[in-house]
Amino acid sequence: MESPQPQQQQQQGPKKRGRKPKPKEEKEQQQQQSASKMKEGKKAHQPSVDEKYTQWKSLVPVLYDWLANHNLVWPSLSCRWGPQLEQATYKNRQRLYLSEQTDGSVPNTLVIANCEVVKPRVAAAEHISQFNEEARSPFVKKYKTIIHPGEVNRIRELPQSSRIVATHTDSPDVLIWDVEAQPNRHAVLGATHSRPDLILTGHQDNAEFALAMCPTEPYVLSGGKDKSVVLWSIQDHITTMATDPTKSPGSGGSIIKQNKPGEGNDKAADGPSLGPRGVFCGHEDTVEDVTFCPSSAQEFCSVGDDSCLILWDARVGTGPTVKVEKAHNADLHCVDWNPHDDNLILTGSADHTVRMFDRRNLTSNGIGSPIYKFEGHKAAVLCVQWSPDKSSVFGSSAEDGLLNIWDYDKVGKKVERASRSPSAPAGLFFQHAGHRDKVVDFHWNASDPWTVVSVSDDCDTTGGGGTLQVSQKQCIRCKKVL
């Protein structure tokens, strides 16, 4: 299945949270700069990245039930769990979605992998510690490659049918893929792009990162450089959903309706396209992230480079329901709505903090009034996500290379003050320090509790294409505070 490109991507400045691998000359220049910075760091008696990593690696058997470290050929800006395929005595097999962001010598790709998730208390401590950070993990195997028209900046799966994923690239369009129906492609220079199963149109400028799928209805939400939030319903394209478990692992038949020859829209030759249900305006700068209210397909929120958190309700119009000015002291990069308590919303920012808001009391004197500020990162926060297993637990990842796990129920309690280090931030539950550069995305596994997949852009630190890690944290499972 091959196709011309969707709407032509527009030339813009470099993205804040990702980049193409650099040509050799730029790499050499950056390595010299990194070496200079490392010397300065040593003068200030600060541990280097390698020293911190070595310390973390020595503690791996103590900290984890299981850990898989997978060296990537090319960086991936996103990682998501797909459907669970098989349950066995000692491990489960599950789909994993990631991408390959290349330097142009081969096409950019959307990768569907199979991941074997080892069950708790199965792996021996020696096995957990003896991984090779420069090798590919035997637990992660590529299953299918889709040649993507442009870089894959963000991947999101449809909860109603997790074989359906949406992707953002450097264009105004959102691309929808039925990953089970798509043919496997060989990514070689000059290969034509795979054909999206559906193209969502409506943005007037590039939409690169802000992307969400609704947990209750087949709705898609996006934000972009045009300062708008765009909502689609792919209901009209649904034909069958998960009615026959023998058709395909975890989902049943495709939900994407294919147009017959001569039917559909102007883009029928390139694949069906769909216009928006609504375009919502209220931001004054790029929209960086969006998320749905867990209990309502009509309510959602967004954050952007204008430092605002905005709540929307599609039932009452296309303007903001509530606009929270100065939700942070810098650009907002990420947002997530608590699936267990829809009053609680998390935001992460370039100001290095994660903030938790209660939508019943969002502002004070016209500016953002969070319930609590979580201060455990030393660089811009790139991703936040609530745990699917415990209502008070969430994770945050940042450009400092850390994936922090927090529990707001512990904040201020005597048991936390007595058990945690005096220098540890309040509420910090666990710190995953296995990455050596910015952690651009992570995703909790809803099928295997307390299991997380994360990806980092380690090109400059490791000399490779980045690192993917799957970790089970026994200290979380045992509810211990570090």
Image (cartoon, rainbow, N blue to C red):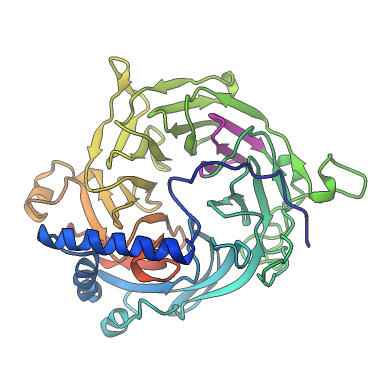
The x and y percentages for residue 76 are 49, 61
Q: Which residues are magenta?
A: 209-232
Work out which quarter of the rendered image holds the N terminus and state it.
bottom right
Depth check, front residue: 31 or 396: 31
Depth check, front residue: 48 or 72: 48
- Based on the picture, tell me whether residue 217 belongs to the magenta stretch: yes
- Based on the picture, tell me whether residue 193 belongs to the magenta stretch: no
**Which residue does the image show at 45% across and 76% down from the upper left?**
91
**Which residue does the image show at 13% across and 43% down from the upper left?**
413
Q: Is residue 466 left or right of residue 2?
A: left
Determine the image quadrant of residue 163: bottom right
Determine the image quadrant of residue 48: bottom left
Q: Is residue 202 above or below residue 452?
A: above
The x and y percentages for residue 410 are 19, 46
**Which residue does the image show at 56% across and 70% down from the upper left?**
113
Q: Identify the residue at the far top of this view.
A: 365
Q: Identify the residue at the far right of this view.
A: 262
Q: Is residue 255 left or right of residue 167?
A: right
Does residue 293 appear in the picture of this structure?
Answer: no
Work out which quarter of the rendered image holds the C terminus and state it.
bottom left
Does residue 169 appear in the picture of this structure?
Answer: yes
Depth check, front residue: 478 or 349: 349
The x and y percentages for residue 110 are 60, 61
Determine the image quadrant of residue 473: bottom left
Number of marks in the image? 0
Depth check, front residue: 401 or 477: 401
The x and y percentages for residue 291 are 49, 39
